[in-house]
Image (tube, rainbow, N blue to C red):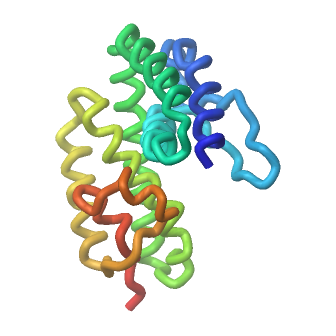
Amino acid sequence: MIDYDLRYLAAGLEALEPYLLNSGLYWPPGVEAKAGQPPYPSLTPGSLLLALRRAEIRASADGSQVEFKRICDQFYKIKTQWLTAWEKKTAQDFHARLGLWRNFLEEFREKPAANLDRYSYEITRRVQLHLLLPEAGDLPAAELQMLSGLDRKLKAIFREGDFVWETDLIPAFPKDPFWFLYGMMEVE
């Protein structure tokens, strides 16, 4: 799976500068997944940060550290050069993902059994919110309060358990602070 993330990151970095200077949040990834792989997500700060986190842990295990370091260096160079645009885009992404996460929790509350199987996919949004938070500059207090409230709602219906993603990613997402990856929502 390291190849999957490295291909996405390489394509994303080629488009990162024009993407940051564009007003839209979602940008075509600029690469197609190989046969049998899931389609790549749109280019967003949250998707880039998640791919970087996964690639970092997998590069260490796979021997792809040189390629990963090259990608990281390029990413941080562009990010530093366009820091204000990056922060604006990450704040925009945070807002969008917060709404999507809230919507999922509401849908689950209304129809738990029908939405339980979506958790391992939907929790990606919560992970991305965590990764975006330190990147987004000053977020509105109302959004931070909403995230805290959504976490309280999740904790009320959460049952601790196994890591919900591929186990090779456990070192990249420790239980503290990624508690929501270690278990599942409970259907009463």
Residue 64 position by quadrant: top right
Nearer to me, 168 or 116: 168
Q: Residue furthest right?
A: 35
Instruction: Pick the quarter of the image with the C terminus.
Output: bottom left
Residue 172, image x and y in percent?
Answer: 37, 50
Residue 104, image x and y in percent?
Answer: 46, 63
- Residue 52 position (above or below residue 157): above
- Residue 132 position (above or below residue 86): below
Residue 43 position by quadrant: top right
Q: Residue furthest bottom?
A: 188
Residue 151, image x and y in percent?
Answer: 26, 62
Q: How many marks?
A: 0
- Evaluate whether residue 18 shows in this view: yes
Q: Residue furthest top?
A: 81
Residue 9 position by quadrant: top right
The residue at the point 27 percent across, 70 percent down is 153
Residue 18, image x and y in percent?
Answer: 57, 13
Image position of 106 (left or right of 43): left
Q: Residue furthest front?
A: 63
Nearer to me, 62 or 18: 62
- Evaluate whether residue 46 shows in this view: no
Image position of 128 (left or right of 21): left
Image position of 112 (left or right of 67): left
The residue at the point 46 percent across, 21 percent down is 75
The residue at the point 28 percent across, 39 percent down is 133
The residue at the point 39 percent across, 19 percent down is 76
Nearer to me, 147 or 17: 17
